Image (cartoon, helix red, strand yellow):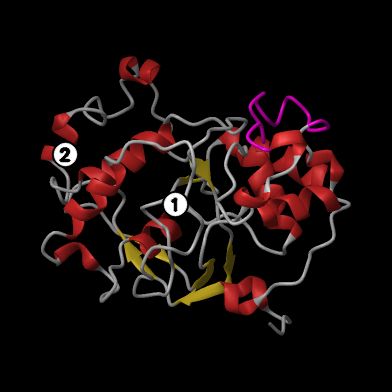
């Protein structure tokens, strides 16, 4: 994990000390057995990343759920959030400071990494790692790994290519994948715990320690699956983020490691 992320986690822990964990509703999470995923930007000869068994929210967090959180923890309301942890657009889509009835079951957006992490922590959870998110997202409706199915990667890429709309659909409208998880591709981008574990920015092109082809066609040409441009889009998007960012197409869902459940009776 990068020093920047460790620093952010330390600050978040200080902010969240008084937060008591809320109850975990088991039906809202899917259990995944874990396995292995290949880092998005590496070649077919690169080692796979192990993924331990974990739980993942079936759908992204909604405006209604996040509004309940900020009511319980007022320091995360738009009017009180510390500027160091949220950009100015934070929750700016809520009229009058709260979501409208029409927004209630839409995915919450305009939330920073700090705010998303605090929400998950307050629920006894955490943000998923990149490896966990990718492991869940590689499943099709019929298989744990749909990458070999005809048209699978093209269908995901077509979702990403859709023009943005002013009004987001409600969560849970897309078909569930093999793990019974929804909306991983077709709704919003999502925060991950270690989104900046590989930092690549426009300024990084001059850094000799980085692969100079990560953001161009040569990266795809040498990768394990050159056709999976959707994966490169996710990699590039995550690499462009900073923890305080609040974007209209960026939401989140929470995860939980199985070791976190010791003593828990969901």
The residue beneath circle 2 is 220
Residue bounds of the magenta highlight: 79-94
Q: Does the magenta stretch include residue 142?
A: no
Q: Position of residue 187 (x, y in %)?
A: 42, 50
Q: Is residue 199 left or right of residue 216?
A: right
Q: Is residue 91 magenta?
A: yes
Q: In this view, does 80 lie to the left or right of 149?
A: right
The tally of labels here is 2
The residue lying at 27 percent from left, 40 percent from top is: 161
The residue lying at 34 percent from left, 34 percent from top is: 236
The correct choice, above or below, for 145 with respect to 251 in the image is below
Asked if residue 147 shows in the view, the reply is: yes
Query: Quarter holding the C terminus?
Result: bottom right
Please tell me in which quadrant of the rendered image residue 125 appears. Answer: bottom right
Q: In the image shown, does 117 or 100 lie closer to the viewer?
A: 100
Q: Position of residue 119 (x, y in %)?
A: 70, 52
SS assignment for the magenta stretch, majority:
loop
Asked if residue 41 shows in the view, the reply is: no
The residue beneath circle 1 is 130
Query: Crowdedness of circle 2 by 10 Å Cα count: few (<14), some, many (20+)?
Result: many
Q: Earlier in the sequence, mark 2 or mark 1?
A: 1
Q: Where is residue 96 in the image (x, y as percent from the top left)?
A: 76, 34
The residue lying at 59 percent from left, 66 percent from top is: 256
Dot 1: element: helix
The correct choice, above or below, for 245 with respect to 54 in the image is above
Q: Report the residue that reaches farthest toward the right.
A: 18
Q: In the image shown, does 133 or 170 lie closer to the viewer?
A: 170
Q: Report the residue that reaches farthest toward the bottom.
A: 265
Tag 2–tag 1 contact (CB < 8 Å): no
The residue lying at 49 percent from left, 31 percent from top is: 241
């Amino acid at each position: 994990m990068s020093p920047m992320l460790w620093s952010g986690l330390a600050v978040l822990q200080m902010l969240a000390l008084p937060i008591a964990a809320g109850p975990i509703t088991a039906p809202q999470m899917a259990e995944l057995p874990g396995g292995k995923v290949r880092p998005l930007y590496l070649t077919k000869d690169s080692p796979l990343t192990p993924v331990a068994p974990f739980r993942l929210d079936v759908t992204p967090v909604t405006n209604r759920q996040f509004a309940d959180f900020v009511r319980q923890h007022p320091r995360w309301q738009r009017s009180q959030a510390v500027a160091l942890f949220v950009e100015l657009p934070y929750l700016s889509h809520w009229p009058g400071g709260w979501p409208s009835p029409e927004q209630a079951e839409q995915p919450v957006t305009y939330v920073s990494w700090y705010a998303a992490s605090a929400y998950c922590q307050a629920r006894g959870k955490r943000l998923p790692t990149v490896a966990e998110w990718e492991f869940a997202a590689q499943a099709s409706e019929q298989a744990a790994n749909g990458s070999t199915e005809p048209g699978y990667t093209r269908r995901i890429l077509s979702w990403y290519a859709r023009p943005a709309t002013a009004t987001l659909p409600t969560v849970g409208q897309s078909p569930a994948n093999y793990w019974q998880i929804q909306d991983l591709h077709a709704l919003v981008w999502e925060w991950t715990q270690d989104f900046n574990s590989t930092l690549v920015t426009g300024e990084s092109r001059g850094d000799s320690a980085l692969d100079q082809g990560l953001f161009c066609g040569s990266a795809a040409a040498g990768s394990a699956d050159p056709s999976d441009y959707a994966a490169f889009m996710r990699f590039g998007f995550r690499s462009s983020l900073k923890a305080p960012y609040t974007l209209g197409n960026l939401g989140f869902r929470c995860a939980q490691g199985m070791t976190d459940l010791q003593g828990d009776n969901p």
